[in-house]
Image: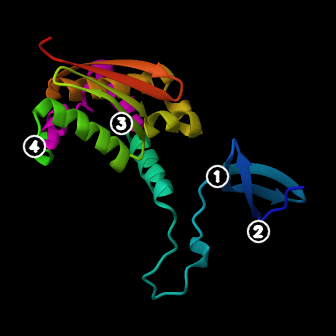
Amino acid sequence: MLRPDEILRDGERLNVLIRLTLEGSSANYCFSFVVRDSIWAFRHLEGITLRLDKVESPPVSEFPDIDEATKIWMREEAAVTQMVYFYNFLRSELGDSAALGWFHDGAGYALAAQAWIPFLSPQRAFVLYACWEQQRLRGSDVTLIELTDSSAAILLKPLYQQLYYTSAHLKQQVSESEYFGMFEAIWHDRAKHGGWRIQFERRGEGILIRLRVENQ
């Protein structure tokens, strides 16, 4: 029988903290309920819990930390949620094409690759920067499969994709095809400014990205 690690009560709100193992991965979960007149109503299930209830009385300058992977997930979820919100707003005001164009950052992305990796050709710098940025800044799993002067291949398991299937609120705001259409539009623009043509192939939890030099 599963036993909760903690049960926290605050008026009608009751939170049950319990550690569960799902698909071989163990994590802490918080089941939130509202209890009125001995009737329990399920409110929310959350896999991230910040124990800020344990912060000492002010003045205080130290706050409980969590692991880096969870913080990366939280930052990416916040950024993608805002992105979807603006996409829906712009689409309703300006149409699909203008809404997608709002997120085109290819010129700056390619310039960053060239500035920060000045030792390689712009095309190679773009590919390697994309791998580094997605892994080290975005927390995605990345495998560089091929890199030559004229072609490249990257197997990417982006947090962007995982977020759609894990965060229920995203599926309520945008369809799957529109969500991944945003991803592809952004990377088409980035690849164009990096000197590449790009193709995508969905592979389970990953996306195979194939690149060819623009003039071939």
CB under 8 Å between discs 4 and 2: no
Q: Secondary structure at mark 4?
A: loop
> Does 193 sit above or below residue 60?
above
Q: Which residues are magenta?
A: 84-113
Residue visible at 18% across and 23% down in the picture: 192
CB under 8 Å between discs 1 and 3: no
- The numbered mark at residue 65 is none
Residue 188 lies in quadrant: top left
**Type of amino acid under label 3:** Phe
| C-alpha separation, residue under disc 3 versus residue under disc 4 | 37 Å
- The numbered mark at residue 6 is 2
Pointer 3 or 4: first along the chain: 3
Residue visible at 49% across and 87% down in the picture: 58
**Residue annotated with mark 4:** 119
**Type of amino acid under label 4:** Phe
Pointer 4 or 2: first along the chain: 2
| C-alpha separation, residue under disc 4 versus residue under disc 2 | 54 Å
Membership of 93 in magenta stretch: yes
Q: Secondary structure at mark 2?
A: strand
